[in-house]
Amino acid sequence: MKCAIGIDVGGTKIEAALVDEKGQIHERMLIETDVPHGYAAVKKQIISLVETLINNHKGAPPVGVGIGVAGQIDKGKGLVKYAPNLNWENAPIKSDLQNKLQLPVIVLNDVRAITWGEWLYGAGKNCDHLVCIFIGTGIGGGIVSNGKMLEGASNTAGEIGHMTVDMHGPACHCGNRGCLEALAGSWALARDAAEAIQKDPESGSLILEQAGGEIQNIKAKHVIEAYHKNDERARQLVNRVADALGAGLAGLTNILNPERIIVGGGVPEHLPGLLSMVEKRVHERALKAAIESLAIVPAQLHGDSGVIGAASLVIHEI
């Protein structure tokens, strides 16, 4: 059975796994990303993980390595043009790894790797028209249309988090205003909570308590914890997230007419009721013809989707 190595490189952790052609993981490894020591140190970590997985594997050698990175990728060169969480600019990860490992290497955006995983083996299986959106600190996505993964003219298709949903909305890290990420990403939820509590401390007392009494320590998880305790301020903040996601996904539904929208990431996984809230808003806003065959479903592969998708792409393309 063919197998490949999938790697998910994030700002806090690197996950590597040996994956077969049925999308099954045979062995996995997880380490902290050595971001402070730069590209060379992280490259060394990746090489070590791959070599360990190869040495431990008793079957046929892997056909190649797939790497998902949270950043902008030059597909032809396998160059990571910019990865803010890693502090990488123009990192030649494909050529460096191929030269060292003597294996084919494919580099792609991390959420596109996740989309491949969900499409081939998860919630998007046997579906030719889908949108995959992952909501964590930021928001990323992938789009499959007519059985093809959309890449765009310069390989940036799927930047769902940076679609404008509020022309006069809050500033986003990308430099724009009113991006979906700036309204519904976990950093935005934490920001909105802190601003609301500064204006009215009493209404956010439970959120503040979860954060140890320090406004500057408020994170999305504290809002979510308060929401699960039926806190009114937390409910208002989560509703705002649902409103933004509903508006954004309604627009995508009208434009792309997907059969499935797959929703995953830390925010919806810790807010199980969010999916139904968003679905209700999409059905209120989107064109009736566009939602006739639409299903909004949770991601199935959870934390494994990135490594499975990266490895599976290698198996399918090599």
Image (tube, rainbow, N blue to C red):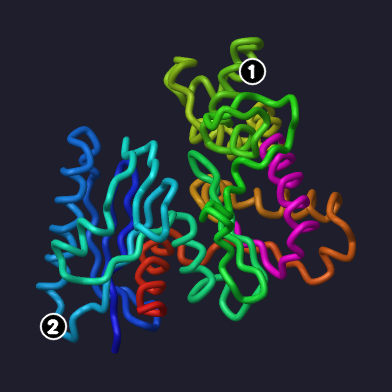
Q: Is residue 224 left or right of residue 108?
A: right
Per the rendered image, the range of residues in magenta is 240-263
Q: Main secondary structure of the magenta part?
A: helix
In what element is the residue under mark 1? helix
- Disc 1 marks a residue whose amino acid type is Ala
In what element is the residue under mark 2? loop
- Disc 2 marks a residue whose amino acid type is Lys
- Farthest left residue? 55
Is 249 magenta? The answer is yes
**Disc number placed over residue 58 in the picture, else none:** 2
The tag earlier along the polypeptide, 2 or 1, is 2
Residue identifier under label 1: 196
Q: Quadrant of the C terminus?
A: bottom left
Q: Position of residue 89 (x, y in %)?
A: 33, 39
**In the picture, residue 229 is in which quadrant?**
top right
Is 172 magenta? The answer is no
Residue, x 17% and y 35% (percent of image)? 37
Q: Position of residue 11 (x, y in %)?
A: 33, 41
Relative depth, front residue between 14 and 211: 14
